[in-house]
């Protein structure tokens, strides 16, 4: 990446999160299938719908800013998805795997939270008010998903994983 301006950096970061979201549309159904907790499965299915909406929102940002995304692969998300897939392959289905995939999903959520926060700050500096509004909407969805996963992880899934349910 040879960003010379804030706009170059904005385009690169937007292209990166677009790739990350596309990767998640493939990973979330796998996480849902691997989940044995019905609430967790539903959370992944709901987040898949949200992720598709977030991709549409990125398209709206691109249009409102009059920019073109770069074709690149988000290597950070690729690593996070791969880590989650390894856990699915290595841990027996059940509460322990549910706890592991919650952790993997939250790592991805935290990456997205950081990315959207950065994008909103860049958009603000560039005077892209419509883009900032859309990016902040997605940021709030990502934070809400992270909170849902925490709520699922704390009492029920962790207790099941520890054999206390």
Image (cartoon, rainbow, N blue to C red):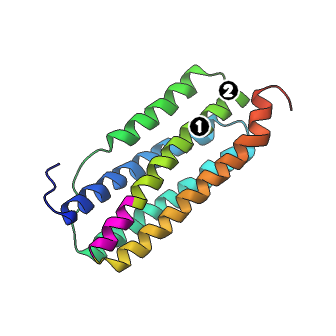
Residue 92 in which image quadrant: top right
The residues tagged by marks 2 and 1 sit, at their Cα atoms, a distance apart of 15 Å
| Relative side of 55 to 41, left or right | left
Q: Residue at coordinates 16% horizontally, 63% vertically from top-left?
A: 5
Q: Residue at coordinates 22% horizontally, 69% vertically from top-left?
A: 67
Which sits in the foreground, 159 or 70? 159
> In this rendering, does residue 17 appear at all?
yes
Q: Is residue 133 above or below residue 30?
A: below
| Relative side of 61 to 106, left or right | left
User: Tag on residue 93?
Assistant: 2
The residue indicated by pointer 1 is: 103
Binning the other alpha carbons within 10 Å of mark 1 as few (below 14), some (14 to 19) or many (20 upward) gives some
Q: Quadrant of the C terminus?
A: top right
| Helix, strand or loop status at disc 1 | helix
- Where residue 86 appears, x then y in whole percent? 50, 25
Residue 131 in which image quadrant: bottom left
Q: Residue at coordinates 43% horizontally, 72% vertically from top-left?
A: 134
Q: Is residue 104 magenta?
A: no
* Earlier sequence position, callout 2 versus callout 1: 2
The boundaries of the magenta stretch are 118-126
Q: Main secondary structure of the magenta part?
A: helix
> In this rendering, does residue 94 appear at all?
no
Residue 34 in which image quadrant: top right
User: Tag on residue 137?
Assistant: none
Q: Is residue 5 above or below residue 28?
A: below
Binning the other alpha carbons within 10 Å of mark 2 as few (below 14), some (14 to 19) or many (20 upward) gives some
| Helix, strand or loop status at disc 2 | loop
């Amino acid at each position: 990446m040879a960003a010379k301006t804030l706009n170059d950096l904005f385009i690169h970061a937007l292209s990166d999160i677009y790739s990350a979201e596309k990767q998640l549309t493939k990973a979330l159904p796998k996480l849902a299938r691997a989940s044995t907790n019905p609430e967790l499965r539903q959370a992944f299915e709901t987040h898949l719908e949200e992720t598709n909406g977030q991709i549409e929102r990125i398209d709206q940002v691109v249009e409102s800013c009059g920019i073109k995304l770069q074709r690149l692969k988000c290597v950070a998300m690729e690593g996070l998805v791969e880590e989650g897939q390894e856990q699915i392959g290595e841990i027996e289905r059940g509460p322990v795997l549910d706890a592991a995939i919650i952790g993997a999903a939250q790592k991805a959520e935290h990456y997205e939270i950081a990315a959207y926060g950065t994008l909103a700050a860049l958009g603000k500096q560039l005077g892209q008010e419509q883009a900032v509004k859309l990016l902040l909407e997605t940021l709030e969805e990502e934070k809400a998903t992270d909170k849902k996963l925490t709520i699922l992880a704390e009492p029920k899934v962790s207790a099941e994983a520890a054999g206390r349910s």
